[in-house]
Image (spheres, rainbow, N blue to C red):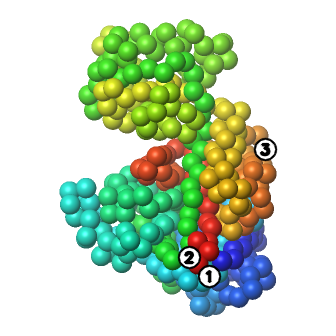
């Protein structure tokens, strides 16, 4: 297994393809088997010609990619300028199955898992890993990953929603020689490849652990057997002045996804607080909690996000027993980046500091896909990483 990542900011998309492709060819011992290509939507007039230019430069390479509002490649992040990145890999003894799905498949949780497996051409015993690039206007990403989790449980899935376009038809998805306007593209890999995931949701907890004691759908009526509004007020009043300002501006809600007591860092699925009705005493959140579930409020700022990222990557490093990935993909929210951290290349730089100088590419997304304790979710304000290692078969 060998990976390379290249980035070009040439104002001509054709020239950017030439430049980035030359860089990855130079870095690899042989032509790549797979190229994941992310391109700025600022090249709007030339996007449909991209697959042809890639075929000329990488004729025997399977290509999957999409547009992005910002592009990540070669350890650098470019948010407000035309850019193209190619993250390419030599994958011996590995099946590479690019796909495009335009239609909605039946809910796999209703027992139609074989329909999903036949459509994608891969079975659970293959132990596949998936990279997913949905269009946010034409694909229900959470429904997609719910179905895929049912069809391929315990198989890691990571990705991001194409960005840069403002309405239906403006994003592009790329699969082989096609430039597409809807659905989802991606790639399934199995064989001498494994993918670890690292999902940094960018928050830190505040206040005590609480228990949901009465709820309905996304509405929480009671926390710790008292009205939810009272619990929220108690959390707020116990915070420092700085934490109160963050809590009032953007309160977040963490749902523990494991039975461990107490849950630790990374055990929470972070969701927005959607609203609070003081008269009814009801808290609305962007998820459906269960009675008895442990929960905790969270806040988000640049410092909390930076520390969360380091902790998540260090845990990934520990899981890999100190081995650096051979290659990596980063799917980061449009709300992160330089405007959030007030410094360029933040998440890419932290990745290198914690995991080494592995080739890293990706883009800034309209939503990020990655697992929290065995179930795949669509996230916001998150950086989701796919970290690739060989199984050491070859």
Q: Secondary structure at mark 2?
A: loop
| Closer mark to the observer between disc 2 and disc 3 | 2
Q: How many C-alpha atoms fall within 10 Å of the one at disc 1: few (<14), some, or many (≥20)?
A: few
86 sits to left or right of 297 = right
154 sits to left or right of 92: left
Q: CA distance from mark 2 to mark 3?
A: 37 Å
- Confirm or deny contact between disc 2 and disc 1 (CB under 8 A): yes
Q: Which residue is mark 1?
A: 394
Crowding at mark 3 (Cα within 10 Å: few <14, some 14-19, many 20+): few
Q: Residue at x 50, y 74 (%)?
A: 189
Q: Residue at horizontal 69%, vertical 74%?
A: 3
- Residue under numbered circle 3: 343
Query: Where is residue 109, by image quadrant?
Result: bottom left
Earlier in the chain: of badge 1 and badge 3, it is 3
Q: Earlier in the sequence, mark 2 or mark 1?
A: 2
Residue 82: image x %, image y %? 70, 64
User: What's the CA distance linking mark 2 and mark 1?
Assistant: 7 Å
- The location of residue 235, given as percent across then percent down, is 51, 14
The residue under the point 57% across, 59% down is: 196
User: On the rendered image, what quadrant is the N terminus found in?
Assistant: bottom right
Camera-side residue of 11 and 75: 75
Q: Is residue 162 above or below residue 116?
A: above
Using the numbered discs, state the Cα–Cα distance from disc 1 to disc 3 in whole angstroms.
Answer: 41 Å
Which callout, 2 or 3, points at the residue further toward the start of the chain?
A: 2
- Regarding residue 76, the answer to whether it shows in the image is no
Quadrant housing the C terminus: bottom right
Q: At 58% from the left edge and 71% from the top edge, which residue is drawn?
A: 391
Residue holding disc 2: 192
């Amino acid at each position: 297994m060998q990976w390379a990542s290249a980035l070009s900011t040439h104002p001509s998309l054709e020239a950017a393809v030439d430049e980035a492709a030359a860089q990855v060819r130079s870095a690899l011992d042989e032509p790549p088997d797979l190229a994941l290509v992310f391109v700025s939507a600022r090249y709007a007039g030339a996007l449909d010609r991209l697959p042809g230019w890639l075929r000329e430069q990488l004729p025997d390479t399977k290509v999957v990619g999409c547009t992005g509002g910002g592009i990540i490649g070669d350890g650098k992040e470019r948010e407000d300028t035309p850019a193209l990145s190619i993250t390419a890999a030599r994958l011996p003894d590995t099946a590479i199955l690019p796909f495009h799905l335009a239609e909605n498949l039946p809910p796999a949780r209703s027992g139609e898992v074989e329909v999903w497996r036949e459509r994608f051409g891969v079975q659970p015993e293959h132990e596949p890993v998936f990279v997913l690039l949905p269009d946010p206007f034409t694909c229900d990403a959470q429904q997609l990953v719910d179905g895929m989790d049912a069809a391929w449980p315990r198989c890691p899935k990571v990705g991001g929603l194409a960005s840069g376009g403002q309405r239906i038809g403006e994003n592009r998805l790329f699969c082989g020689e096609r430039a597409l306007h809807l659905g989802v593209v991606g790639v399934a890999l199995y064989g001498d490849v494994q993918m670890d995931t690292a999902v940094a949701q960018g928050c830190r907890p505040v206040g005590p652990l609480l228990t949901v004691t009465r709820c309905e759908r996304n509405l929480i009526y009671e926390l710790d057997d008292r009205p939810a509004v009272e619990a929220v007020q108690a959390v707020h009043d116990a915070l420092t002045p700085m934490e109160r300002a963050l809590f009032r501006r953007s309160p977040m809600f963490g749902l523990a996804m494991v039975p461990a007591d107490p849950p630790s860092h990374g055990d929470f699925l972070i969701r927005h607080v959607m609203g609070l009705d003081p008269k009814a005493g009801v808290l609305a959140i962007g998820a459906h909690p269960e009675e008895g579930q442990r929960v905790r409020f969270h806040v988000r700022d640049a410092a909390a996000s930076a520390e969360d990222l380091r902790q998540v990557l260090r845990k990934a490093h520990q899981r890999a027993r100190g081995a650096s990935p051979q290659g990596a993909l980063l799917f980061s929210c449009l709300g992160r980046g330089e405007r959030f951290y007030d410094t360029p290349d933040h998440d890419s730089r932290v990745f290198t500091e914690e995991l080494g100088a592995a080739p890293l590419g990706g883009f800034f997304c309209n939503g990020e896909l990655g697992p929290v304790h065995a179930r795949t979710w669509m996230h916001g304000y998150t950086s989701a990483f796919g970290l690739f290692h060989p199984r050491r078969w070859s």
